[in-house]
C-alpha cells in the first residue's frame, strides 16, 4: 500500500495509504525516516555525451607518461561541462556504465550525482588473486604503464585521519564502494595498498586495511624522487623514475603491519644493538659483590621475586643492591616500600651510602656518626637517586595504581628500577569467580609487561606462607604465600636467608639463594654468602672459612630432617 513521488532534488517522499477503522475514507500519512532514501541513478552512455579525447588532453596525459593505448583501453573520454572541456573517467561493472567522474586539468573534480559508488577499473580485478588499490584514476593508469592491469582506484578522496570507530556495513557510507564491490575483492589473497604518501593517504590505507582484512594487505614504500623529496604517488614515480621503478615499488611491497604480529626483521636494529653491546647492559649490571655476579646480574626489563622468612633482611639486601648499582651505573629507582616509614627508609639508605651510622646510638658502637656535611650531601644523593610511591589514604594501593605511578616516574625522572615491597601490603580485592592463583598470575603478568615495555627492572618482595616444623633451613620459592606462579612467571627468583644458629657460624651471615635464573647469559642457580654490618647496613662478601662452616651445618640439618 505504499505510494509516493520523487522531487527534483532526488529525495523521495514516501506515503502510506492507511485505512482508519472508523472511517472508510483513506488518508495519506507521511512516513518519517531517520534519513532520506537515496535514489540510485542508472546512467546511459548517450545521456553523458562523451567524446574522444582531444589532442590537447592526449598531450596532457603523455606528459604524465600515460599512453594513448592505455587511455583507449580504459575508455578515458572528455565532455563539455559548465563551458569547459573536462576529462571523463567512466566507472563500469561488467562493461556497463555505473558512474562517471570528471577532472579539470587544474585538478578540480566532480561526478555524476546519485550514482552507485564502485571502484574505478573494477572489471580489471575480476577473479584476480592479486589486487592493487590506488588513490586516483591517473595512478591506476600509471600502474598499467608499469604492466599492472589488476589495479583499481577508490572513487573518493582520502580522509584527514583514521576514524575512531569502525561502523557497520549499513552505516559505512564513505566506504560503500568496498561493500558494493565485495564479490570482486573477496577472491583476492593479496591486496597491495598503494595510496598516497601524505598523512591522508596513509589514513586511507588504514581504513581500507581495516575493512579488507590486514592479514591479506600489503603496503608500498614510495622511493625518493631527488635527494630531499619522496615520490607522493604512482604517477610521480612513473614521471620521475620511469615504469621500471614503479614496478620495483610493487615488487618490494611489504606486509601491512598488524598490531601484535611481527617479523624478526622488525627487531633487527634492537638485535644488532644487543649483539654489539651498544647499551652496555646486555650482560647485566653487576651487583657489587663478586660472589654474586656469577649467579645474578640485573637486566633492564626483568622481574625478580625476592622472598625469605620474616626478619631475614630481604628489604635491607635490596636497598644495599640498589646503592651498589647506583654507585656503579647511576641508575635511579622508585620505591613502593609500604612496611617502611619514610624517615627510617632514608636512614637505612644513607647509612649504606655514607658507611656511617645515622645516630650516635648504641647500635653504632664506637663508629663515629655521619657529620652534618655528610648528612646534607647524603640528602642530595637521596633526592636525586630515589623516588617514592606512597599511598596517603587509609585504603590499600592496588597494583594498577602502583604501576601507573611507576610509569610516571620512568617518563618524568628516568628511573630504571622499581621495588614493590611487599606483596601482602597491596589491595587484593578480586572478582568472586577468580581464584587466588588466577589473580596472582594476572598481577605478575601486568608487572612483567610494565618492566618490558619501560625497560625497567622490578624487584617484588613476597613473604612465604607460615612454615610448619621449620628446621631453620632456607625456604623454597614454592613456599611463597598465594601461588606457585611467583616462581613460574618471574625471570629471577631469590631467597634471602639469615643464619640464626650461633653454632652454625656468625649470625651476621646472609645466604643469597638463586633459585631461578631464566636468562643463562646473566647468571645461574646457586648460593652466595654475605656478611651484614649491623652498624652501617652494608653487605660484604663472607670469607671462605665462614662459608664452609655454614654449608657444613646446613648439610647436617638436612641429614637430620631426612632421618625424621
Image (spheres, rainbow, N blue to C red):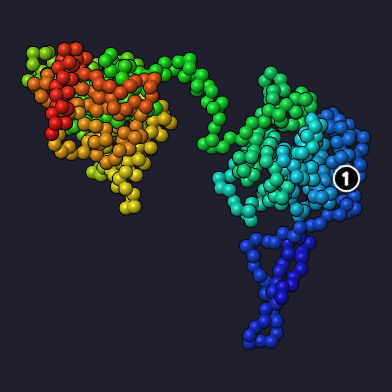
Identify the residue under disc 1: 79
Q: Is residue 397 left or right of residue 136?
A: left
Instruction: Give the residue at x 48% y 17%.
Output: 275
State the residue in front, 54 or 194. Answer: 194
Seen from this angle, which residue lies furthest front? 563
Q: Is residue 436 left or right of residue 454?
A: left
**Within-10-Å neighbours for mark 1: few <14, some 14–19, many 20+:** some
Q: Quick check: can you spot residue 249?
A: yes
Q: Is residue 347 left or right of residue 201?
A: left
Compared with 150, 454 (above or below) is: above
On the image, the x and y values in percent for residue 32 come to 64, 67
Q: Is residue 260 left or right of residue 36?
A: left
Instruction: Give the residue at x 12% y 13%.
Output: 368
Instruction: Give the residue at x 19% y 26%.
Output: 497
Compared with 447, 549 (above or below) is: above
Compared with 94, 322 (above or below) is: above
The quadrant of the rendering that contains the C terminus is: top left
The quadrant of the rendering that contains the N terminus is: bottom right
SS type, badge 1: strand
Q: Quick check: can you spot residue 324?
A: no
On the image, the x and y values in percent for residue 149 come to 79, 37
Amino acid at each position: 500500500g505504499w505510494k509516493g513521488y520523487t522531487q527534483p532534488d532526488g529525495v523521495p517522499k514516501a506515503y502510506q495509504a492507511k485505512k482508519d477503522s472508523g472511517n472508510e475514507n483513506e488518508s495519506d500519512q507521511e512516513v518519517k525516516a531517520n534519513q532520506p532514501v537515496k535514489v540510485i541513478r542508472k546512467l546511459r552512455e548517450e545521456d553523458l555525451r562523451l567524446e574522444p579525447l582531444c589532442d590537447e588532453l592526449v598531450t596532457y596525459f603523455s606528459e604524465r607518461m600515460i599512453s594513448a593505448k592505455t587511455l583507449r583501453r580504459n575508455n578515458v573520454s572528455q565532455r563539455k561541462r559548465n563551458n569547459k572541456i573536462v576529462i571523463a573517467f567512466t566507472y563500469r561493472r561488467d562493461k556497463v556504465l555505473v558512474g562517471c567522474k570528471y577532472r579539470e586539468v587544474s585538478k578540480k573534480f566532480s561526478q555524476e550525482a546519485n550514482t552507485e559508488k564502485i571502484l574505478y577499473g573494477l572489471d580489471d580485478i575480476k577473479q584476480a588473486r592479486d589486487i592493487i588499490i590506488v588513490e586516483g584514476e591517473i595512478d591506476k593508469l600509471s600502474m598499467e604503464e608499469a604492466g599492472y592491469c589488476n589495479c583499481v582506484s577508490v572513487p573518493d578522496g582520502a580522509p584527514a585521519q583514521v576514524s575512531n570507530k569502525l561502523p557497520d556495513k549499513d552505516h559505512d557510507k564513505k566506504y560503500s564502494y568496498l561493500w558494493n564491490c565485495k564479490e570482486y575483492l573477496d577472491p583476492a589473497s593479496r591486496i597491495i595498498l598503494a595510496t598516497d604518501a601524505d598523512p591522508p593517504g596513509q589514513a586511507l590505507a588504514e581504513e581500507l586495511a581495516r575493512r579488507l582484512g590486514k592479514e591479506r594487505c600489503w603496503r608500498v614504500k614510495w622511493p625518493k624522487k631527488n635527494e630531499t623529496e619522496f615520490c607522493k604517488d604512482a604517477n610521480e614515480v612513473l614521471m620521475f623514475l620511469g615504469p621500471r621503478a614503479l614496478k620495483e615499488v610493487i615488487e618490494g611491497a611489504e606486509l601491512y603491519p598488524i598490531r601484535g604480529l611481527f617479523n624478526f626483521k622488525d627487531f633487527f636494529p634492537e638485535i644488532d644493538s644487543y649483539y654489539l653491546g651498544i647499551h652496555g647492559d646486555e650482560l647485566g649490571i653487576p651487583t657489587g659483590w663478586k660472589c654474586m655476579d656469577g649467579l645474578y646480574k640485573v637486566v633492564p626489563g626483568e622481574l625478580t621475586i625476592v622472598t625469605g622468612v620474616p626478619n631475614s633482611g630481604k628489604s635491607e639486601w635490596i636497598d644495599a643492591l640498589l646503592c651498589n648499582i647506583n654507585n656503579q651505573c647511576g641508575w635511579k629507582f622508585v620505591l613502593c616500600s609500604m612496611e617502611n616509614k619514610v624517615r627510617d627508609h632514608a636512614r637505612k639508605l644513607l647509612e649504606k651510602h655514607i658507611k656511617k651510622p645515622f645516630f650516635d646510638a648504641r647500635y653504632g658502637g664506637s663508629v663515629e656518626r655521619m657529620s652534618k656535611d655528610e648528612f646534607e650531601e647524603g640528602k642530595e644523593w637521596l633526592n636525586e637517586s630515589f623516588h617514592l610511591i606512597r599511598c596517603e589514604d587509609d585504603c590499600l594501593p592496588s597494583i594498577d595504581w602502583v604501576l601507573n605511578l611507576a610509569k610516571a616516574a620512568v617518563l618524568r625522572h628516568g628511573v630504571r628500577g622499581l621495588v614493590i615491597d611487599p606483596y601482602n601490603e597491596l589491595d587484593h580485592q578480586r572478582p568472586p569467580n577468580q581464584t587466588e592463583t588466577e589473580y596472582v598470575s594476572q598481577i605478575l603478568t601486568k608487572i612483567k609487561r610494565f618492566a618490558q615495555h619501560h625497560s625497567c627492572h622490578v624487584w617484588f618482595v613476597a613473604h612465604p606462607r607460615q612454615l610448619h616444623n621449620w628446621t631453620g633451613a632456607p625456604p623454597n620459592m614454592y613456599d611463597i604465600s598465594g601461588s606457585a606462579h611467583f616462581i613460574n612467571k618471574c625471570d629471577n627468583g631469590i631467597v634471602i636467608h639469615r643464619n640464626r644458629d650461633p653454632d652454625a657460624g656468625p649470625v651476621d651471615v646472609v645466604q643469597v639463594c638463586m633459585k631461578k635464573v631464566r636468562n643463562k647469559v646473566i647468571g645461574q642457580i646457586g648460593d652466595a654468602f654475605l656478611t651484614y654490618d649491623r652498624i652501617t647496613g652494608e653487605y660484604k662478601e663472607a670469607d671462605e672459612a665462614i662459608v664452609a662452616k655454614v654449608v657444613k651445618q646446613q648439610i647436617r640439618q638436612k641429614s637430620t630432617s631426612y632421618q625424621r
